[in-house]
Amino acid sequence: MSAVTAAAPTSDPAADVAADRRVAAALRVLSVDAVAAAGSGHPGAPLGLATVLWELVAHHVRLDPDDVAWADRDRLVLSAGHASALLYALGHLVGTLPPGELARFRQWGSLTPGHPEHGHTAGVETTTGPLGAGLATAVGLALGERLLAARAPHDLVDHRTWVLVGDGCLMEGVSHEAASLAGTLGLGRLTVVWDDNDVTIDGPASASCRDDVLGRFAAYGWDVLRVDDGEDVVALRAAFAAAAAGSRRPSLVAVRTVIGRGAPGVQGTSAAHGAPLTADDLAALRADLGWEHPPFVVPDDVGERVAAVLDGKRSARRSWQARQDDWRREAPDEAAAFDAVATGVVPADLETLLPRFEPGTSIATRVASGRVLAALLPHVPALVGGSADLAHSTGTALPAPAVGDGDFSGRLVRFGIREQAMGHALNGLALHGLRPFGSTFLVFSDYARPAIRLSALMGLPVVHVMTHDSVRVGEDGPTHQPVEQLESLRLVPGLDVLRPADANETAACWAGALRSGRPTALVLSRQDLPVLPAAGLDRLPEDGCRVVRDTPEPDVVLVATGSEVSLALEAADLLARQGTRARVVSVPDRDRAERSGALARSVGRAPAVALEAGSTRGWWATLAGARATAVVGVDRFGASGPGDRVAAELGLTAEHVARTAARLAAPGP
């Protein structure tokens, strides 16, 4: 059980409760003052949740504002990110938020953005805002804690993950995926606190959702508790303590609250949700709380109570630090091995560990990826991950033990058919310092898109393995044949989209992804591809592309990614028989090749033809500087049939490419 640090008691428990109520009042007023100063925000949830949050922080959540990155701190996630003013009010009280920042709520350049952003504001564990995403990410955080605890002395990794969710978080489909996964994995150090106020933007939550939420979570394998009044600190304390005492089952604590509590004009209604309080409502709230202080001023008695709470928490962190220091002195090799996992260390000689594939042979890049992963697992102990029930299809059925049945010493996670929850859980694992990967078919990246977007927004080194990357999937038909997905992934800022041409490029892409601090979408073929000559391919090309067939003063340049590189080489052979000289360029990273100018240099003054088995739209802009251009791709949905036949019917043949290139290369009239 995770240790609980209580506030420093006095000889009068009633006085302690009164002091805590004053802190909760401060959180309420600071929150609504921030919203009022911005003229924008969500006051309702902070007013309803203030007592709940302070009870958690004062008596249950292990933290130290002097070291917000303390490794064994509890993780506190505000999944209902619209209530960010409450989180910032807490930061204002405990000192993690610089003076003046609360008054700059939602302003350009402030540390108090509209929704919490990890890496931007101290104490924010993960970026939240899309409802349910925080809960799903917290599942990854809780899983990360268990994985690390299995690799270190128990008392050095022994923290909890606490999540505040609202009605909207639990309506979103991702909450079902994530809660089911957490129950299956037995994440007993995860506690979700539900702000059960029965209000959404459009009115009562019960008008659109009448789920038996406690029954639902119990069915997922969770312990469930209810607190009927979010102001009843005795009941809250008992429920949170019971949740923290759980063993192998996550906990849901449903707390009945009143949205906009204390603001008489709007409390209990959807009007409290997303607009600043009126001047009259603000005055009435202050009067109800007996609050006579100007905006953003913290009275002495509140500051004293907060300081007393924090003193107790600092001692817990110092005790942990002393135990860790002793362990590192007594077992330096064990500590170094643990650090390699907890900090995501990648070997300096990573490229020498990669398998090499013989030119002239054929292998699908998804299969090559699996061999690369199998080779790297013993040398990159932070590498953990799995698939959305597609391990054999995506090349992630690896020779390593799986996590399950209370055993977290394994490396592979069975995420089940839960693409979005998998993506968010990967983000949580990365936030814990691990190097996670997850896999599914490229067409199903649409399910995972919100999580991929947050990977990029937070700059997390997650590898999203996307296989079955084109209409060559074949008989499964257009529902399973990606067309627009590859191009749409390239639109995500900060996401590296890599589509290797063959097995050796796949290995180089894996090394590049692991060396990167950014998320990667690794896009791989179902079908076998010829292994190309790998001369000079020791690393992923820094400028995003490489010439795989050259000729002096080419008549035309064929630019391709993935499986279409070998198609371009076939077309170049056909062109050569006609006396047309073609250069072939493989572009595993189109964005980097474009930014670096390498692609433009490779094309030079020659006409260019781009080949990719997907949407052509982005290629027209990429090749805009070429003398003449054509793009061979797929701008329609596919069809069911053998993969080669589908590709041929849609123009993905060497003959069609050669004819297109010959027309461009022909001298004008």
Image (cartoon, grey):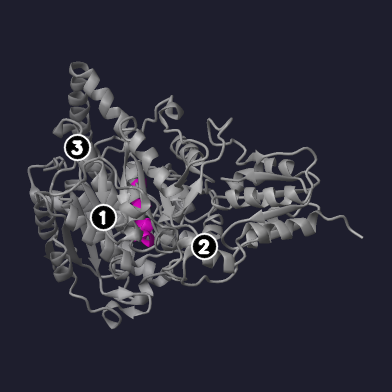
How far apart in space, not on screen, are marks 2 and 1 (Cα)? 49 Å
The residue type indicated by label 2 comes to Asp
Q: Which part of the image, by quadrant, shows the C terminus?
A: bottom right
- Name the disc covering residue 149, or none: 3
Q: Which residue is mark 2?
A: 644
Q: Is residue 79 visible?
A: no
Q: Which residues are magenta?
A: 80-92
Name the residue that disc number 1 marks: 163
Q: How many marks?
A: 3
Task: Of the two numbered discs 3 and 1 on the same chain, state the one appearing first in sequence.
Answer: 3
Q: Residue, x 12% and y 62% (percent of image)?
A: 224
Q: Earlier in the sequence, mark 2 or mark 3?
A: 3
What's under tag 1, amino acid-wise? Val
Q: Does the segment drawn in magenta span residue 165?
A: no
Q: Secondary structure at mark 2?
A: helix
Depth check: 548 or 270 in front?
Answer: 548
The residue at the point 34 percent across, 67 percent down is 44
* Residue type at the position of mark 3: Ala
Circle 3 SS class:
helix
